Amino acid sequence: MGKKELDWSNIGFAYHTTEWRYVADFKNGEWQEGRLTEDPTVTLNECAGILQYCQEIFEGLKAYTTADGSIVTFRPDLNAERMIDSAKRMEMPPFPKERFLDALEQVIRANQDWVPPYGSGATLYVRPYMFASSPVIGVKPAQEYEFRLFVTPVGPYFKGGAKPITLCVSDFDRAAPRGTGFIKAGLNYAMSLHANVTAHANGFDENLFLDPASRTYVEETGGANFLFVTRDKEIVTPLSDSILPSITRRSLMYVAEHYLGLKTTTRKVRLDELKDFAECGLCGTAAVISPVGRIVDHNDIINFPSGMDEMGPVTKELYDTLTGIQQGTIEAPEGWIHKIL
């Protein structure tokens, strides 16, 4: 057995069916023994809770081949903990952390030939998810659930390098105060789809969503957190109870402070102060950091000094340091790298 014969740098950021995935059922009030299966299909009753009332949560992380040939994942314990928090908010039975990590290891080991080689720019994307599987017609939580985990190789998120993107301030709201914006549930992403299609139709790459209560403060995009750099190199991220607590953002803030010696602050960020920042980026699992060069607020245009040609210098240093940690060329903080093979 060896690596799959794929053109790793050209496979795209898309789904590719691999041989094995993991399934565990919640029945009779407890999680049953999990299993690996080669069947990628899911069979559901027409009245299943996921189809009727959208009881579903998910996570996203990656497996990497490091410089020494090891296969590792990055801080999967935090994904397991965030999924537990999401399950509690959605009235779903939390999948135990130790079982989450075991399922992760089983599936990556079983599909190790699909883990892209070091230096290819590609990675193995890991998607754990859970949904209500039993019939429910009244508006209430289901009684049965499935936890599943599959993997798919993905190419570099930015083929040819990360070029700064242009955002628009959305006229739509992503999440409500005291709602579900802080958990990783499919319903939150569904809320952003119309706004995203509208933004793309108008020539923008993504949306900037404001707080729905006052429409004064920056929240996040449809699927990533914001990171700003001041002119004196302070790293600032928005504070809000309705944005997803990004593991990538949390890691970048640690890197900024402990590796690069920069000041970091998490606080409310007003829309009208964006013009004062030197750099802007979106942070998440897929791309680590997507540089932002311009934000359009209807008739007002904010051009960041970092420009539209390349990542700003501080953003680039953050990106290079974190990806170096993930790929094993820079020493990682204790507990950040979870070795599989």
Image (cartoon, helix red, strand yellow):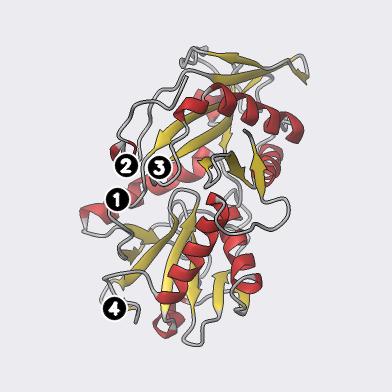
Mark 2 and mark 1 residues within 8 Å of each other at the beta carbon: yes
Q: Which residue is mark 3?
A: 122
Dot 2 surroundings within 10 Å: few (below 14), some, or many (20 or more)?
Answer: some
Q: Amino acid at mark 2?
A: Ser
Q: CA distance from mark 3 to mark 4?
A: 38 Å
Q: Does the CB distance between marks 2 and 3 fall below 8 Å?
A: yes
- Name the residue rendered at 36%, 69% in the picture: 311
Which numbered disc, 4 or 1, marks the residue closer to the eye? Answer: 1
Per the image, the residue denoted by label 1 is 159
Q: Is residue 251 above or below residue 16?
A: below
CA gap, disc 4 to disc 1? 30 Å
In the rendered structure, the answer to whether residue 207 lies left or right of residue 199 reads right
Please tell me whether mark 2 or mark 1 is closer to you in this view: 2
Whole-number angstrom distance, CA of label 2 to CA of label 1: 8 Å
Say which of 50 and 336 sits in front. Answer: 336
Q: CA distance from mark 2 to mark 3?
A: 6 Å
User: Label 2's element?
Assistant: helix
